[in-house]
Image: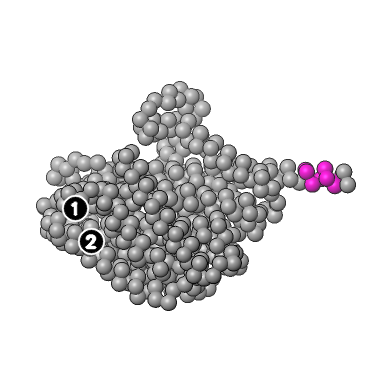
Amino acid sequence: MNTTLLLSVVVGYFLLLLIVAWYTSRGSNNESFFIGNRNSNWLLVAFGMIGTSLSGVTFVSVPGGVGTGNFYYFQVVIGYLLGYTVIAFVLIPLYYKLNLTSIYTYLEKRFGTGAHKAGASFFILSRVVGATARLYLVISILQLFIFDKLNIPFEVTTIVVLLLILLYTFEGGVKTIVYTDTLQTTGMLLGLVVCIIVIVKSMNINFGDALTLMDQKGYTKIFNTDIKSSSFFLKHITGGMFIAIAMTGLDQEMMQKNISVKNIKDAQKNIVTFSLVLLVVNFLFLFLGGILYLYASLNNIKVAPDDLFPTIALSSAFSGVIGILFILALISALFPSVDGAITSLTSCFCIDIIDLNKTEKTEKEKKKTRLRVHFSFALLFFIMVMVFKAINDKLIIDFILKFAGITYGPLLGMFSFGILTKKKLNDKFLWLVVVAAPSLALGLDVLSSPEWYEKKLHLSLGLDKISATLFHGYKIGYELLLINGVLTFLGLYFCSLFVKEVKNIKSEIE
């Protein structure tokens, strides 16, 4: 594959993004950056959210995971559909009723400033780690197939990519991202469909034959009925439901785009449309994984799961077209997840942490502060990518979902407690709960799957016997988020009882 040609495609793609950013950011202000002046087209938001939800990790890791996990990931996708239904008809009405710019403002209205800061802090922690992990994976692939051959260091590649993202997001923010995400989702889906067609034809079979061969290999098995397995269907569906609620409905990046839509009905149409399309797109990714493994088996290709798709797409066996489409699709999958992350983190820090809108600064001064925060997060992204490079582990999708299970659990517990109860809390105790609950959930996960952590940490924990005694082979899977959320909810409930008891004692004294 011609390296210069691939580089030219990448540069041309960036130039197109910059042109779109320049056009859409004209006349922008802080409101445009944070919520797109609440004038975004719901259909564009729905389509663009597909790219944001999938990212480069899905593009590479979901097909790569078919070899060992069959189509079990589709169980999670079914759970997503249930979760998006809750978002559309429970959370979206709440956010519009309160006219929120940041969804974590709800926690302040319900519990106080401490809850507001806690919610925003967990979002920032989770989004920084998750987005930089995705960024690292895609840059690693671009580095391997393009920039290493041009003797460009990994660090330089990362800096250039982040600078380009800054160039097209620093002015327009959400207003710009709604359009650039639409463009990038189009590129990603086009690349996905064409790659499937070309690889199937290269094996001289049709789609029916491909499904039959995949079925013979066991790849098309969707439901896992082994209750002890981490991919047991009820675990995956339940986990997927709460992952969708937490990582979309309680995520400022995703909801920032939704609340930029004109009205509540359009926002609900956006979520419903997006969830149905996502069901189809994820199945296509799994189908792609199946045919990639069939092709690899026929051609004796043996590589790491996350390297399978790029290795085949950029091999000499195919024409330059599929390689170009793969690179376009890959960077199209990368940028919606990174540009939106930096923008939402900037918004969250400015609104939730430093209360920029409540200060007496002029519009110009607020913009300067916002730009400093924006560039600071870009620098933090660079540092985190270097950390992931030092760790050098590309099998990253499991790590992202586990980390999300720890960091989004307190958000799930706080929002659930606020919506489902009318009880009051003391901010002083809330922080204790939101730190203790994820710590306990992490401890349970380590005990249930010590081998996973031993592999990641490169050390022996010696917990095998304890795990066997306590869990009898049961492995915590994607339900980790739900366990964490329940622990947070229970902790908040007991705190509310304590607050009530203190009030009763004061009443008796008086």
Q: Main secondary structure of the magenta part?
A: helix
* In the image: residue 447, left or right of residue 211: right
Please state the extent of the stretch shown in magenta in the rendering: 501-508
Q: Secondary structure at mark 1?
A: helix
Residue plotted at (54% across, 70% down): 362
Return the mark for residue 10.
Answer: 2
- Circle 2 packing at 10 Å, graded few (<14), some (14-19), many (20+), is some
Judge whether 69 appears above or below 419 on screen. above
Structural crowding at the residue carrying mark 1, measured as other residues with C-alpha within 10 Å and reported as few (<14), some (14–19) or many (≥20):
many
Disc 2 marks a residue whose amino acid type is Val
Circle 1 residue: 146
Q: State the CA–CA distance, disc 1 to disc 2.
A: 10 Å
Residue 439, percent across and down? Answer: 53, 37
Three-letter code for the amino acid on which mark 1 is drawn: Ile
Q: Quadrant of residue 105?
A: bottom right
Q: Is residue 372 above or below residue 469?
A: below
Looking at the rendered image, the quarter that the N terminus falls into is bottom left
